[in-house]
Structure formats: C-alpha cells, structure tokens
Amino acid sequence: MDFQRYKNLLQETWESKDFFKGDKIIWIVLVWLTAISIVIVYSSTGALAYRRAGGDTSHYFLRQMEFQAFGYFIIIGMLIFVKVSKYNKLANLFFISSMALVCLGLIFGRGGEGTGRTLPLGFFNFQPAEFAKVALILWVARLLANTQKDPRLLRIAFFKIMTGVGAICLLVSLANFSSAVLLFLTAFFMMFIGRIQWKFLVSVGILGGALIVIIYFTAPYLSEKLSIGRFATIRSRLEMMIHPNKSSEKGLTQKEFAMIAIHRGGVLGVGAGKSEISNFMPAAFNDFIYSIIIEEYGLVGGIVVLLLYLTFLTRGGIIIRKSSRAFPMFVATGAVTLILLQAIINMIVSSGLFVTGQPLPWISWGGTSQLFTAFTFGLLLSVSSETEQELKKKAESEFNSECGPSDEEMVLTKF
C-alpha cells in the first residue's frame, strides 16, 4: 500500500516537474556552495592525492561530486516522500540510535590518532557524530514542541533535554570535543527559542564554562593516568589561545599556515588552483578550507562565501517565522542554527582566532558530513515546502469563503 502511494507521489512530482520544492533562494545558495566546493576541493586535495591516491588529483574531486550528487538525491527524496510529521515520530529512535552509534565508534572506531571518530564500513567510513547532530535537532524539537502550552511541562522538558544533551555531548567529546560543543550550542539556542526560562539557560551557561575550566586543569591526570578521551588535545588548544607564541616552538601550526594563506590572498587572491599553502596543511580541504578560498580568491571570495551563509540565515529566519506549527518551527530553527554555527566555527578557525575543527557546511571535502548536511538542508526545505502548501490552502480557503458559492453551486443547491 505504501509502495503504491510513493509511486503515485513520484509520478505526480515527475508530471509537475516540481522536484525542487521549498524556498528557491536556499536552493540557489545550495547550488552556489556546490560550485565553490567542487572547485576548491579539487585545488586543496592535490597533496593528499599524491600521499594517498597515487597522484590521481581527480580522485577526491570526483569523490566529492559523488557525495554531493547523492546529497541532492537525499534532499529531493525527503521533499517527495517524507512529511515533517514523520520525523516527530522517529525522533526518539534517531536519538537512541545516535547514542548507540557514538558508543560503537568509541569502542570499534578509528580516526586521527586513534580518536575513534569513524566506524569503518569497508566501502565507507561513517562518522557517528554527524548523525548525532541531526538526531539531536529532531529530539529536542519534539520535546519542545510537545510542551509549549504548559509551563510545568516545559520545565520538565528542560531537564530531559539537558540530561540527553549532556549524555550525548559527553560521549561525543571523548572523540571530538568541537562537535560536542556544536551540539550543545545548537540545543541551547533551540531552548532559547523554545521559551525555556532565562534562569535555567544562564545556569547551563555557567555550568558549561565551569566544565571547560575543570577539563583544562584536570586534563593531564585524565589523559595520562586514566587514558580518557582527548582532554590533552582540548587543553593544548586552549593553551594555544592563551599563549599563542608558544605554539610555534616546534614549527608552524595549521593556524599559522591559515594566516599565511589569508595574507597571500589579499583582496583578489592568487588565482584559482594556485594555492601553495594547501600543500603544507593536513586539513586544508576540511577544517581550514576557508583560508584556502581566501588565498585563491582573496577577500572578495571570502565575502562571497560569507554572504551565501548570511543569505541562508535570512531565508531560514523567514521560514521559521512563517511556520504555524511548533515541531516544524523548531526543526527549522535547529537546522539553521547547526549549519550557521558550523560555518562560523570554520571561518573563525581559518582566520586564526580559535583552534578546533569543523568542516565548512557543503563546501569542505567529506563523506558522512556531506550526507548529513544534505539531510539538514532537506529538513529545512521540507518545512519550507509544507509551510508554503499550508499558506496556499489557507489563502484559497479564505478566498472561497469571501467570494461565496458560485452560480453553478447555487443551481445545484436548488436541485
């Protein structure tokens, strides 16, 4: 029965040629980000290709195109086949599954310096933290949406959210602290929009700051004596912000290479494919890709990318404001927050103002990150599409009620 329904939906969509539902400006932003990604990934993965792909400089470029093409299929499939209300029903399952996958990643996974970030699946390395980002949005959106009408239930939702977010962030932080921070900030902003009382939010902010201070001072003991997580890495990155000059004692760091790349780029850049710094930066195609964009295309290129994300923020805000139902509104809020925060973190890191690691959404090279970024875009576009349909039906209904019954309807009524 469901198969026939999906078949009918696909046929109707094909006949109407309306594959690209939802906000058209966001689709345009997505296409522009795709074009930038393909060009800059080809340029920044040259050294990586010689190290790992036998000198085939097109290997990672083609791989990126494959993942992005698959990402578009994910978005279009979500728009055609899945209603936003379905995610509400699946939110708990997604969140529990993400917790299980993060645990499996810590036990059986592998990654840079044995961090356990990825689960090797043979043909594909899966990053559980990327799935956790999407699962967290849906789960928090469900809890907030179901408790908006009762302040007492909203307080209960807050403690549930903090318990779940605290657990998932703790697990993710053992493999990737920056992803844990991103998860926490996304949930925090969703709670702010969800009318959680200020006193609770302020107490959470203080607790988060205190936790970072505790990690900083206990990191040597936790890492050396108990061998727990990446706390030594967290401390070293905090040290690099507090004492930036000491980071150069053992040679140039990626942060300093990024600053050199930005200096070389100037206003107009050195030209497409002419980056030299990408040959020396291990994460040039990922965490520091924004600095390579500026090196090749200058300040102008950097501003263009920034404007694309700001346009995404503006259109996302319009979608959130138009949404008439709580769950879709919170889903859209989480999707916009996640993508924008991740973009801001990448840009700040690439500018040398902070030291951590997050890919630039839909631009950085990656597999799992690309697919779940596509899923996040799909969530936002699904909310936009359904909101547009609801507003259209409402307008038609109001128009019909104002105009009254037609002459033909009046005649039929008499008979």
Image (cartoon, rainbow, N blue to C red):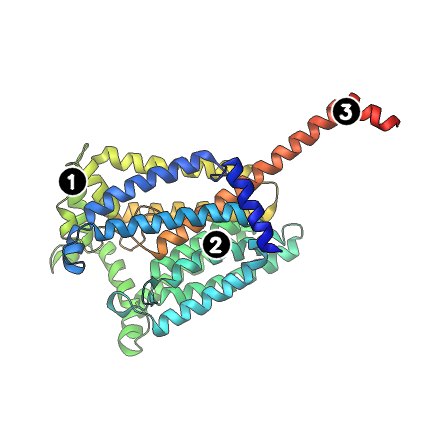
Query: With respect to residue 203, does 7 lie above or below?
Result: above
Residue neighbourhood size for the residue with mark 3, other residues' Cα within 10 Å, grouped as few (<14), some (14–19), many (≥20) = few
Judging by the rendered image, the residue that carries numbered circle 3 is 404
Query: Residue 263 got which mark?
Result: 1
Side of 388 where 45 appears, left or right: left
Which mark, by number, is residue 187? Answer: 2
Which quadrant of the rendered structure holds the C terminus?
top right
Which label's residue is closer to the chain start, 3 or 1?
Answer: 1
User: In this orientation, does residue 408 appear?
Assistant: yes
Say left or right for 353 vs 52: right
Q: CA distance from mark 3 to mark 1?
A: 67 Å
Above or below, 147 relative to 9 = below
Q: Residue furthest right?
A: 415
Q: Nearer the viewer, residue 6 or 337?
A: 6
Front-most of 235 and 57? Answer: 57
Q: Earlier in the sequence, mark 1 or mark 2?
A: 2
